[in-house]
Amino acid sequence: MRIRIVGAGAMGRGIAQWAASAGHTVELGDVRAEAVTEALDFVASMLERAVAKGRMTAGERTAAGERLIPLADPWAAGEDVELVIEAVREDLDTKAEVFGRLERALPASAVFATNTSSLSVTRIAATLQDPSRLAGLHFFNPVPLMRIVEVVPGAATRPDIPPALTALVESCGHRAVTVADTPGFLVNHAGRGLVTEALALLEESVADPAGIDRIARDVLGLRMGPFELMDLTGLDVTAAVIDSIWQGFRHEDRLRPSYLTPNRVAGGLHGRKTGRGWFAYGPGAPGPAPEAPVTGDADRPAHVPGDGPRAVALRAALTAAGATVGAGREPSAEAVVLVPVWGTTVAAAVAAHGLPADRTFGVDPLPPVGRRRVLAVTPASGPAAARDARAVLARADNGAEPYAVSVVRDTAGSVAQRLLASVVSVAASIAERSLAAPADIDLAVTTGLGYPVGPLAWGDRIGAGQMLELSRSLYATTGDPRHRPTRWVTERAQLGLALTDPGTTPEACAD
């Protein structure tokens, strides 16, 4: 296939390298001639690096380089061009001008694709004489390494174009997901679940950024915590995406931005690229403050009230680690009381069951991926009792390393539960609106965001019923509509279906 790429910046040159390496002839044009030269030099260096790393042979490198054709004029006639991929700046007027000129220069048979990450594909297409020839083809940076592409049909896109683009993407070694033309498309939309909830936890002073990141990594298994991720992406970029998606979905509560970000952006605290964001970077920059050492009495008796499965599991784990653990309704006079909370607060358990407020604490019952547990304290907690409770939780059995124990402020569901509930709920809301298929949601998120598992499959690991219980408890405890249960999770819990199951649709029942 002969492909023309207009825009020789970071995205354009990455797409050019990807397509040429896969065997396609690639024309590369830009209004700045020097940008094309720089892009070709960059691609040549990347191909050379691929040879050095054994990812391609010298012959393959030479052939790929020969398939790259610099254009002196990006609007040149091209009767053989079958596909144009636009990769210019994110501005509707600029993209409209690009496609308008291409429409006059190229045959009507050429398919147009925009690499927009934030603009409406339908609005871009509406500027053309023939809007049916254009679709979205959203790559991620760096293109050769981020092996996921969103195929986005606009309202007027011809029905044959999305499957053709999907076939092209997958023949070149990437995975393609078909996504509705909605704010943020799929990956950016799904990614709001983590960062918006992390910001909400920080607003409420549940934990500091470093503490939330530790829990995200060690309990949930994320490669990076949400605040590290915002610093890497750039808080200016993250804040703009959060705002645009929230506004695009007409102020949907589940996507609500935080008041914390605008001032940081205005102050130039954008993250790694400015040397300081949520954390400091560069030579001599201090890292996050280390965690306080565990200093309490690990031999102090503990009491885990209740006979539900979470209480039973916590008692068994602590007993296996050699702790003295009591059961039943009444704790001893010396015991610290450890309550496994699920979408509720420790304060509510104290009030409901008459537990001693100064020595009752919450424990997150989510099984940690790493060696970390989470202890929640209330305003009534005694500091000495909290230190002892932390020491008890740090105990490990069979000679294993002790657990790290994060101490957080009491909140409905604690930190990891709220992050997970938000991730799953945002993905479920995408599925219930039919913006993308469940399998595509999980594929796009694991590939594009690096989560250890797709959000719907993650919910299935916990169980649809437990995820519904968690959402209901969060909503009932806080009254915040951001936590309301989704129809997708509610129905599947009630019907015994997996969250990854697309289910039966009315269309499937038609003759």
Image (cartoon, rainbow, N blue to C red):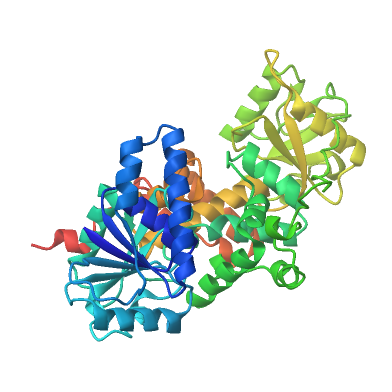
- Residue 180 location, x and y as percent? 34, 67
In the displayed structure image, the side of residue 166 where residue 430 appears, left or right: right
In this rendering, position of residue 307 left or right of residue 441: right
Taking the image as drawn, is residue 203 in sight?
Answer: yes
Whole-percent x, y for residue 334 in the image: 87, 29
**435 or 459, nearer to the observer:** 435
Could you say where residue 291 lies in the image, as x and y percent from the top left? 82, 38
Residue 349, visible in the rendered structure: no
Q: Nearer the viewer, residue 131 or 47?
A: 47
Taking the spot 22% from the left edge, 67% from the top edge, the residue there is 81
Q: Is residue 13 above or below residue 305?
A: below
Residue 73 sits in which quadrant? Answer: bottom left
Give me the residue at 86% from left, 34% from top. Answer: 387
The one of 69 and 133 positioned closer to us in this rendering: 69
Please give left or right for residue 400 compared with residue 190 in the image.
right
The reply, left or right, for residue 152 in relation to residue 12 is left
Say which of 248 and 413 sits in front: 248
- In the picture, residue 328 is in which quadrant? top right
Image quarter where the C terminus lies is bottom left
In the rendered image, residue 259, in percent from the top left (x then y), is placed at 71, 71
